[in-house]
Amino acid sequence: MLYGGYDHSIDKKGRIAIPFKLRVELGESFMVCRGIFGKRCVCVYSMKQWEELVNKIGSLPMAKSSVVKRFLYDGAFNVEFDSQGRILLPLSLREYADLQSEAHIIGVDSNIEIWNKDLWAKENMEYTPEAIASIVNELEI
């Protein structure tokens, strides 16, 4: 399970260090892509999670799945860590998520999200204790 939030810088070449705890869960080779859930972030998936996502998208009716696949695959890249635990974020993904020099990395259960630090702060302001409580109430805990 991937969890935790981390602030990291992005160097001039577009490399960002991924925390060791998250690297262990991802494995040696993994996928980075545009976020597909209406958020301007970069998503990182282990190969297993990537295959599960692709299979789920493939279960949609063809007209819908082909649209999602085009969007997803056009911005998807197979990446590996360098010797310092960094990944190179392709320019197209950095532009999509407005990633420049500072980023916020979040473990979100089965994948990682990499956010522009300012966009994350704005997004996170919406997650008030009351808003979260109204969602959690649906669980009847």
Image (tube, helix red, strand yellow):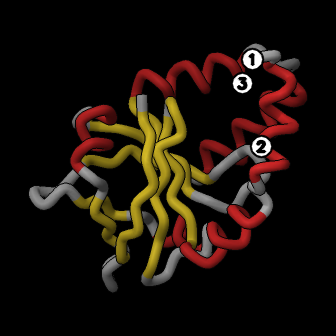
Q: Given this view, does label 1 or label 3 mark the residue nearer the observer?
A: 1
Whichever of labels 1 and 3 marks the residue nearer the N terminus, that label is 3
The amino acid pointed to by label 3 is Ile
Quadrant position of residue 55: top right
Q: In the picture, which quadrant includes the N terminus?
A: top left
Element assignment for label 1: loop
Within-10-Å neighbours for mark 1: few <14, some 14–19, many 20+: few
**Residue occupying the point 33% across, 85% down:** 12
- Whole-angstrom CA distance, mark 1 to mark 3, is 31 Å
Q: Check disc 2 and report the residue beneath it.
A: 132
Q: In the picture, which quadrant includes the C terminus?
A: top right
Whichever of labels 2 and 3 marks the residue nearer the N terminus, that label is 3
The amino acid pointed to by label 1 is Ile
Judge left or right: residue 11 versus residue 108.
left
Residue sticking out furthest to the left: 83
Eyeballing the image, is 54 above or below 40? above
Q: Check disc 3 and report the residue beneath it.
A: 57
Element assignment for label 3: helix
Whichever of labels 1 and 2 marks the residue nearer the N terminus, that label is 2
Percent from the top left, x then y, of residue 93? 54, 64
Q: Given this view, does label 2 or label 3 mark the residue nearer the observer?
A: 2
**Residue occupying the point 40% across, 60% down:** 6
Within-10-Å neighbours for mark 3: few <14, some 14–19, many 20+: some
Q: Are marks 1 and 2 in contact (CB under 8 Å)?
A: no
Percent from the top left, x then y, of residue 68? 76, 38
Q: Check disc 1 and report the residue beneath it.
A: 141
- Camera-side residue of 88 and 63: 88
Eyeballing the image, is 27 above or below 127? above
Q: Are marks 1 and 3 in contact (CB under 8 Å)?
A: no
